[in-house]
Image (tube, rainbow, N blue to C red):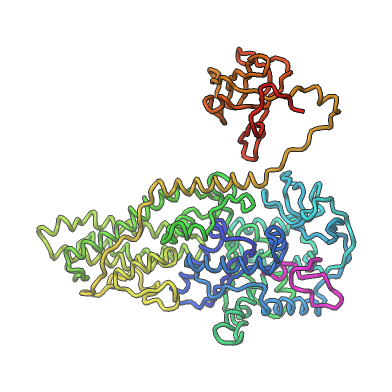
């Protein structure tokens, strides 16, 4: 069997975060690495989606061109994936000429077969910006969950797919104005007429995950409707028809075709031409698997298959679409706009060498059937209690004891006890259990079996106690250490899909050659795992070193604080100046007596954490004024300062004290207060005019 495995084409409008990784990229890499270890032919393709409104929104925000945006983030995203060990055969981009050509050929083929409906319809138009509005340029209230910030194509709060016409109180994100409807011509894929064919395809895959099947059946039950495959935009792939200036291919028409053009790109890079790409997309013995997040289910299970059907040139359809749900972060939804995220490139810089820890935690908490959550405390616990205390502990003990008792070489096995035989039987069973879980897209389960494998090694050493047996029976210790090392060798092979960096280090210690950079040259394949004679007698093992390090509280607390600081900074950046109060007449304003006073005494008000009590010299007498600024100023720093106050405010009783006036303050974005003071000292009681 041949496999074409795709991972979602992410918009090149920002960095990668852990939600993206947990949603599709880490599970896809686990699956592909396993397939390669099994000896299967695999093409693992992905890339950046470089068209669509999110790109133009980011360009506008950063004050650069859309091309500069995609160039910047393509480079960053690609390198981040390399650094995390995501083993794409090709990481392409939809701005390449080969993608433009492939997408336009697709459109033209369907058009020539009368596969589109040409319709003039009314769409929202921004009269201020003077352009038609793509779905993402329209924001309004979701008709399902009342989210006031739903987009014209989808509500990100409840996940409902929408059309701009369904939004309540829509407005343009370009100008903020209310859009108007204007007529425009576009080409629609008649999904309604194709529904029987699409339904037959969807219903033939009863093995799909319930979340995937559920979304598809919901769409089919509601009845498919024609969907526009072109848009009125100036950024994107031009519609390959005459007199279509200002129109581009709908991003969800051309973006999935990016998997095909990426395959061509891969072959071009390897061979200098794209010959043979059809093998990966049309051969009946090729299995197509899409790894995506749940927000892309409909596009990969209905719209892209419908596009392939309409093209009609023998393309295979997706065999499976193992979409994950969403991963949340520290009790809140991940939000790029609010900067509530753990960004991959920052993680790799701040926690160097911890790639596999992140891969492990994201897999252990993967949102396979429902939304899950990442917390830094759980990250720390899993690192310390599982990777360090279980996996790393077993390997380190096996290495250290072999050097101590067996001169750093694989000793010969002698006579086996019943416990030895039981352990070797269990050893032989683990690879098949882990492999079955991976093949069925149950990566959490596979990882759990992997850790049970490491526990087997710990249990074996704990019960055989070679550190005690060495006192009386050195030959028996040789057998114990041989079996422990064989467990470690198999553990290295089955760890590779999940923990590629760790597997490489373990292979290094055991003298097994394995490279994570060249994934085609593994010295051992999956079928070798479970073999009790993987390591030959007498083979030298490398020096022992720790595979994992304990994560200290200070490291975790720094990451948590960073999150909250970023969130606060974002809130401050988006905070707007309060609206002006209603207009007052000059006569009303002139009734206020604003003066400068000098603070003579200051003290806290008992039983209040907000109030300070001041004795103020107003030029005539000394008056008491209470002010709720105790969280911003201490009594000591206020003494001697000159302040602006309202002198003719009616007295008010506050916590048993009479306040005769109000000290004026300016409040900044972050809620901090500043005194309104003269730039030089003036006489107490000076009026403000």
x%, y% of residue 93? 63, 72
Q: Quadrant of residue 320?
A: bottom right
User: Residue 526 vs residue 541: left or right?
Assistant: right
x%, y% of residue 313? 70, 80
Name the residue located 44 percent from the left edge and 51 percent from the top edge.
379
x%, y% of residue 585? 86, 28
Q: Quadrant of the C terminus?
A: top right
- Which residues, given as a range, are shown in magenta? 230-255
Q: Is residue 473 visible from the viewing direction of this image?
A: yes
Q: Does 236 lie within the magenta span? A: yes
Q: Does 612 lie within the magenta span? A: no
User: Residue 274 vs residue 468: left or right?
Assistant: right
Q: Nearer the viewer, residue 513 or 159?
A: 513
Name the residue located 80 percent from the left edge and 64 percent from the top edge.
226
Residue 332 against residue 664 in the figure, above or below: below
Name the residue located 84 percent from the left edge and 32 percent from the top edge.
583
Q: Nearer the viewer, residue 156 or 480?
A: 156
């Amino acid at each position: 069997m041949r496999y074409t495995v795709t991972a979602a084409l992410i918009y090149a409008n920002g960095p990668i975060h852990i939600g993206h990784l947990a949603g599709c990229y880490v599970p896809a890499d686990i699956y592909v690495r396993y397939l390669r270890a099994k000896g299967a032919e695999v093409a693992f393709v992905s890339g950046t989606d470089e068209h669509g409104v999110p790109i133009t929104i980011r360009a506008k925000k950063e004050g650069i061109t859309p091309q500069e945006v995609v160039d910047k983030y393509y480079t960053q995203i690609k390198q981040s994936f390399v650094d995390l060990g995501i083993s794409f055969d090709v990481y392409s981009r939809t701005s390449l000429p080969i993608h433009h050509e492939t997408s336009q050929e697709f459109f033209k083929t369907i058009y020539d077969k009368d596969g589109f409906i040409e319709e003039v319809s009314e769409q929202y138009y921004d009269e201020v910006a003077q352009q038609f509005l793509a779905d993402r340029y329209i924001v309004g209230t979701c008709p399902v969950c009342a989210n006031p910030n739903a987009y014209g194509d989808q509500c990100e709060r409840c996940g409902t797919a929408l059309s701009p016409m369904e939004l309540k109180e829509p407005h343009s994100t370009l100008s903020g104005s209310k859009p108007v409807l204007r007529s425009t011509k576009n080409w629609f894929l008649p999904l309604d007429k194709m529904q029987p064919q699409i339904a037959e395809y969807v219903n033939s895959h009863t093995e799909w995950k319930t979340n995937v099947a559920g979304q598809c059946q919901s769409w089919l039950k509601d009845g498919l409707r024609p969907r526009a495959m072109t848009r009125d935009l100036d950024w994107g792939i031009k519609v390959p028809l005459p007199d279509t200036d200002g129109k581009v291919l709908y991003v969800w028409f051309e973006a999935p075709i990016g998997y095909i053009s990426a395959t061509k790109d891969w072959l071009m890079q390897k061979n200098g031409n794209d010959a043979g790409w059809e093998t990966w997309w049309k051969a009946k013995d090729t299995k197509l698997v899409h790894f995506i997040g749940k927000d892309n289910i409909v596009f990969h299970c209905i719209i892209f298959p419908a596009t392939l059907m309409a093209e009609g040139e023998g393309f295979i359809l997706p065999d499976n679409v193992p979409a994950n749900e969403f991963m949340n972060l520290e009790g809140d939804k991940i939000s790029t706009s609010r900067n509530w995220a753990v960004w991959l490139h920052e993680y790799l810089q701040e926690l160097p060498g911890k790639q596999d820890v992140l891969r492990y935690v994201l897999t252990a908490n993967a949102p396979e059937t429902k939304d899950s959550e990442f917390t830094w405390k759980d990250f720390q616990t899993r690192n310390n209690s599982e990777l360090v205390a279980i996996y790393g502990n077993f390997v380190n003990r096996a290495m250290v004891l072999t050097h101590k008792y067996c001169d750093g070489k694989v000793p010969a096995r002698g006579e086996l006890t019943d416990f030895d035989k039981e352990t070797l039987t269990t050893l032989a069973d683990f690879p098949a259990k882990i492999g079955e879980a991976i093949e069925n897209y149950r990566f959490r389960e596979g990882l759990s079996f992997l850790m049970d494998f490491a526990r087997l090694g710990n249990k074996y050493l704990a019960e055989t106690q070679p550190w005690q047996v060495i006192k009386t029976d050195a030959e028996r210790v040789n057998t114990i250490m041989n079996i422990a090392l064989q467990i470690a060798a198999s553990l290295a092979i089955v760890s590779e899909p999940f923990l590629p960096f760790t597997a490489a280090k373990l292979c290094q210690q055991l003298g097994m050659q394995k490279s994570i950079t060249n994934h085609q040259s593994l010295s051992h394949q999956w079928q070798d795992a479970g073999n009790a004679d993987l390591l030959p007698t007498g083979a030298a093992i490398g020096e022992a070193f720790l595979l994992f390090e304990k994560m200290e509280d200070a490291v975790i607390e720094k990451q948590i604080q960073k999150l909250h600081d970023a969130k606060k900074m974002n809130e401050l950046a988006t905070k707007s100046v309060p609206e002006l109060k209603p207009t007052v007449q000059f006569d009303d304003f002139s009734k206020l007596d604003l003066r400068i006073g000098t603070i003579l005494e200051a003290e806290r008000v008992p039983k209040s954490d907000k109030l300070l009590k001041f004795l103020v010299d107003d030029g005539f007498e000394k008056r008491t004024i209470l002010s709720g600024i105790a969280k911003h100023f201490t009594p000591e720093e206020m003494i001697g300062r000159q302040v602006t106050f309202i002198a003719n405010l009616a007295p008010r009783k506050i916590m048993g004290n009479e306040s005769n006036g109000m000290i004026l303050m300016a409040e900044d974005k972050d809620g901090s207060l500043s005194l309104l003071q003269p730039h030089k000292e003036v006489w107490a009681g000076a009026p403000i005019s």
